[in-house]
Amino acid sequence: MRTEIRICGFGGQGIILAGIILGKAASLFDGNEAVQTQSYGPEARGGASKCEVVIDNKLIEYPKVQSLDVLVAMSNEALIKYIVDLKDNGTLIVDPGTTDVEDVRDFIEEHNIEVYEAPATKTAMEDIGLKIVANIVMVGVITKITKIISKEAVIKAVEDSVPKGTEKKNIQALEAGFDLVE
Amino acid sequence: MAEEFFIQGNEACAKGAIAAGCRFFAGYPITPSTEIAETLAKDLPKVGGSFVQMEDEIASMGAIIGASWGGTKAMTATSGPGLSLMQENIGYAFMTETPLVIVDVQRGSPSTAQPTMGAQGDMMQARWGSHGDYEPIALSPSSVEEFFYFTIKAFNLAEEYRVPVFLMTDETMGHMREKMHIDESKINIVPRKRPELTDDYLPYKYVEDGTTPMPAFGDGFNIHVTGLTHDERGYPDTNDPDAHDRLVQRLCNKVLNNRDKISSVFSQFCDDADTIIISYGSPTRAVIEAVLKIRKEGKKVGYIKIDTPWPFPEKQILELTEGAKHVIVVEMNLGQMYYEVDRLLKLQTRVHFMGKIGGLLPTPDEIISGIKRAEGE
């Protein structure tokens, strides 16, 4: 079944790496198909950043979002901009430290959106001591909530994608993400 | 041996270049092509190759022309603004029959327009960008895996016909990541035809298939390489109308006479189709999804994916569209390959245009609406 995920926030938050990890986990380590696309501004940091991952158990033709199943917002600007693409009964995952779901409450109620608040940035800073691993915490959260990819695959994908020597901290961040939601 | 990767189109292109035997890259980085240069800067030295970041695009073309004449397979990568700057030396490469590969990861245009957005606005620039009569070869991949294999094919065609070959892709394909399955047994490399050193050796001798074997600097041949009209010895002969006619006709015909061998398309559901969609490169991904969807509604729609926009696959398109009432050309510009299709088919079929600019892929739903609109006309 086709599942469409969009992760969005600011450039520099590791939004695109989070998408790559999900895509790699699904395609290389779970044996499914995945396509990851991205859009970003010309700035290196601070501009809006958006990453889309489509996962399916069969070959994926159209690589972009058509009917968004899961929106992960790591900035309030991105939350407000992209919530409108989320389908009815879709899943919204936000970092309450960087977003305010009250700003999109009307949409959530009107479209029966399932909302998860996962303080990824706070967890990254307090539990791991590194703000920059908030994206990996979020990958853990997405894995746990959506169940589209297996934990084993995502662990392998993180190890395969992060800079050498940082694997331990990143796996800690991932596991903190697993534990952040029920 | 088979291997699987989850990588970007641009990275697949760089891997394809190395697999094809490319050992020299010169370029000037430009979004959205930069990852090709970045990957080759890391990987070329590991296989004994060289990477040079040049001062600009025209110098980059000059450097790869020189490398190719030095006996090395060479490539550059750019986007529209860079391709504009390369045009003078691209013409020189055609006239001097220099095999090389130019990758254009197209972005919003004209001018510098949209660095991080996709487009297909340079298709005619690949065809006619430099002045004069010449016949380019261009390939357009529509998956990451195809980007790898088409890069190898581009090098092979460049060597086989001694021409610059374009890889015309776009931001979507360059930056998209997906699973790439590489089977080394499927990789076939065409080596450069080298001449024999004889007393009566002529570097531009007329040969039956049009492609003269190419010596390298340092091999011991006495040759002159020039953009001026030249005779079989390579000497300038600029006032003889016949010499010019013979040379330029040969340069064009070595590609045109092999058009059906060089050009290729992939098609599905065309046999019974009332409507056929034609596309190339990344929009093909939306077209296939749209066709699969609309066929479930019982509509007889097929598609043709053009793998080689140049030389334009006339024979294949004529044959495949024979029974169709409508042909729709989908591309990310305001009409380029559409005019080629219309020229070819207008006497037998209605040809419709569906273009989109702005940087985003057309969606399957937009294409389905386009099909219904065309059929209703």
Image: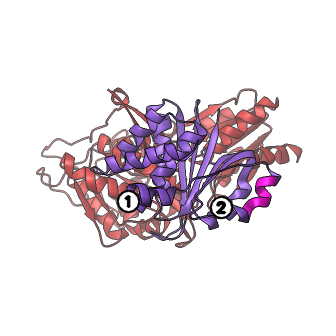
Chain colours: A purple, B red
Q: Nearer the viewer, residue A179 or A25?
A: A179
Q: Nearer the viewer, residue A8 or B110?
A: A8
Tell me if residue B332 can be seen. yes
Amino acid type of disc 2?
Leu
Instruction: Name the image quarter holding the N terminus of chain A.
Output: top right
Distance in Å between CA atoms under marks 1 and 2: 26 Å
| Front of the two marks 1 and 2 | 1
The first of marks 1 and 2 along the sequence is 2
Label 1: chain? A
Q: Is residue B15 above or below residue A110?
A: above
Q: Sort mark 2 into few (<14), some (14-19) or many (20+) by Cα contacts within 10 Å.
A: many
Residue A178 lies in the magenta-colored region: no
Q: Residue at x 56, y 71 (%)?
A: B113
Q: Residue at x 48, y 69 (%)?
A: B81
Q: Is residue B184 above or below residue A79?
A: above
Segment tinted magenta in the rendering = A104-109
Q: Position of residue A60 (x, y in %)?
A: 59, 37
Per the image, the residue denoted by label 1 is A129
Picture quadrant of residue B66: bottom left
Instruction: Name the image quarter holding the C terminus of chain A.
Output: top right
Per the image, the residue denoted by label 2 is A79
Amino acid type of disc 1?
Gly
Q: Nearer the viewer, residue B189 or B48?
A: B48
Picture quadrant of residue B188: top left
